Amino acid sequence: AQNAPNSDWEKKVTEYFKEKLKENNATNWVPSLNDVPVHYLKPNSLVKFRCMVQDMFDPEFYMGVYETVDPNTNARVLHFGKYRDVAECGPQQEIDLNSPQTVTSERQTFYCVPVPGESAWVKEISFLTEPVLCFLNPWPHAYISASQARVSPSTSYTPSRHKRSYEEDEDMDLHPSKQKEQHMACKSCFPGSGGDIHGCVEPKRLETEASAGHHVISPNCSPPLDLNFPLPGEKGPACLVKIYESWESFKVNDVLEVFGVLSVDPVLSIVNSEERDSSSLDPMECMDTMEEQRVHSPPASLVPRIHVILAQKLQHINPLLPACLNEEESKTCEFVSNFMSELSPVRAELLGFLTHALLGDSLAAEYLILHLISTVYGRRDVLPLGKFTVNLSGCPRSSAFTEHLYRLIQQLVPASYHLRMSIESMNHSRFIPHKDYTANRLVSGLLQLASNTSLVIDETQLEQGQLDTAGVHNVTALGNLITWQKVDYDFNYHRMEFPCNINVLITSEGRSLLPSDCQVHLQPQIIPPNMEEYMSSLLTAVLPSVLNKFRIYLSLLRLLDYSISDEVTKAVEEDFVEMRKNNPESVTADDLHKMLLVARFLSLSAGQMTLSRERWLRAKQLEALRKARLQQQQCVNGNEL
């Protein structure tokens, strides 16, 4: 209102909220769509949402500034259209579409879903109730905060525009035709793409919560509404996130935390329903238009809109860590130094925990730690650097060992998925996202995952059978993911590479059919009579505070820098030459690469950000033990593992 002719007000809004959210952990006081059902939140209020960008729609145009006129008095009022879906006008006002004051602006719409495979502890944990980790006060946020308790249900609210009494609201509910009439009386709308037509009324908010599954029955659509979650059984809202600036810095599969204005106006559903009813006389054209409108403009009660004021790309989604590990911030430095000072006992406890989980095999536990802290830190041409896919062979099939191991891993990492590899799942699952040109959207697949997701592939489920064409494509996609850390999305006429950073652990009886960077053969020292009871007792025996330290340990070490000094590089080269002299056939360049990887993650696991001679020797020792175990198993079975 104060700066209508001046565009600087938009920057002032962003700066204002940015500064306010820094004060006294203010982010914790903003209600989150991840935790609070949509119908508990006040429309047009500030909310936050932690999400993954599943798809990007075409940019849309809207009225950044528009003018309303009263036909009786000819009085004119200037309005701004940013951060809203519905135009603001009184009962006796009309929007002057030909006004010279009108300014058309552009915004980008992202279709966002909750982070696929996000662990339950990420949603549930709160540092406010954790007694042991008191030194972590500088945490900027935890995902479930006291804000949830402060959100109260509201069946009515006071809009900033034309006010209506609660009795009138009830009248509208009992006589929907009145609602439609009022809508038609002021149907001058923001021009926008994707069928996002904007009305000017404020009917009573729908008190319906989005379903937890993939499909939701929409009142305006006969087929079920597919919320397009990448993984089956996912819960949480999908949102249309509307970004007004710097949207080119975000891409598909990025994990974001957005702060913005919640828009759940039922008018959007009414307008879109009318648009579908009268869109075209040509049946074929109508079908195409309807399908695209269903996807791009779903009912706001099921897929709410967020008009973004602030958005940041998240390095990780572990609520026990600072959101951004910026070395320049003193609080972050304090956090890292405090935790690194007690890293050694945490590693020892984690090694013991995983040794028990792997039935007493300490060597396999060492490699599992290295796997869990591995991450793609760079790419050289097409080769991803830092990936460390482990094939844990020798896993017992009958006791559902992998299922129980996965449940333990799920308690340690922020996001994960258990892929049961069977002939049926390979032939009938959709692994690769593909473009649906009719609906103009990217249809998700199992491999559309956020960075640093742990993917546990259970090959012990595989039986004899025939893979069909889809099954072969899915197995190929898994191989490409493991080898190149990329997924080729299907755009019908071509395929597009999407780089990724997924930690893959394969459990199998013999050597895996899939490629891997490292095969470790499991040698159980104990065979528990009841596997489920044994694994459950492991978790209950660990204190919550210790479990949280494990979670911090695995997330933090992925984010640390690592280097090798020239002196150590020269020593490693000389050592490799010696190894080649002594055993030229069994020591290859691939072995050197593997040993350097093991040495890297071994150093980081001990909190050392440079390679030392001691860690290099330990890496060689671990690799020698691993290879000796494989050779021993090969001799026992008489065939290659």
Image: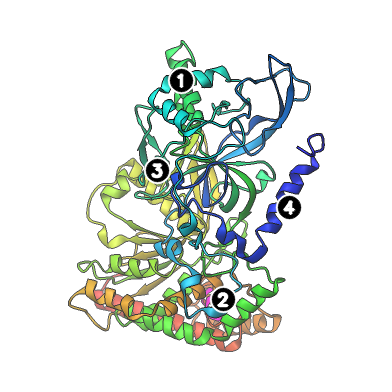
Question: Which amino acid lies under the numbered mark 1 shown in the image of this protein?
Answer: Lys
Nearer mark to the viewer, of 4 and 1: 1
Q: Residue 15 carries which label?
A: 4
Q: Is mark 2 on a helix, strand or loop?
A: helix
Is 585 rendered above or below residue 273? below
Callout 3: few (<14), some (14-19), or many (20+) C-alpha neighbours within 10 Å? some
* Residue 512 percent location from the top left of the image: 34, 63
Q: In this view, does 132 lie to the left or right of 261?
A: left
Sequence-first disc among 4 and 2: 4
Which mark is first along the chain, 3 or 4? 4
Residue contact at pointers 2 and 1, CB within 8 angstroms: no
Upstream in sequence: badge 2 or badge 3: 2
> What is the three-letter code of the residue carrying label 4?
Glu
Q: Which residue was labeled with disc 1?
A: 178
Visible in this render: residue 439? no
The majority secondary structure of the magenta stretch comes to helix
Query: Badge 4: few (under 14), some or many (20 or more) residues near its Cα, within 10 Å?
Result: some
Q: Nearer the viewer, mark 3 or mark 1?
A: 1
Is residue 86 visible in the rendered structure shown here?
A: yes
| Disc 4 + disc 2, Cβ < 8 Å | no
Image location (x, y in percent) of residue 262? 55, 43
For the magenta stretch, what is the residue range?
596-603
Picture layout, residue 347 above or below residue 391: below
Q: How crowded is mark 1: few (under 14 residues within 10 Å), some or many (20 or more)?
A: few
- Say whether residue 7 is left or right of residue 112: right
| Residue annotated with mark 2 | 136
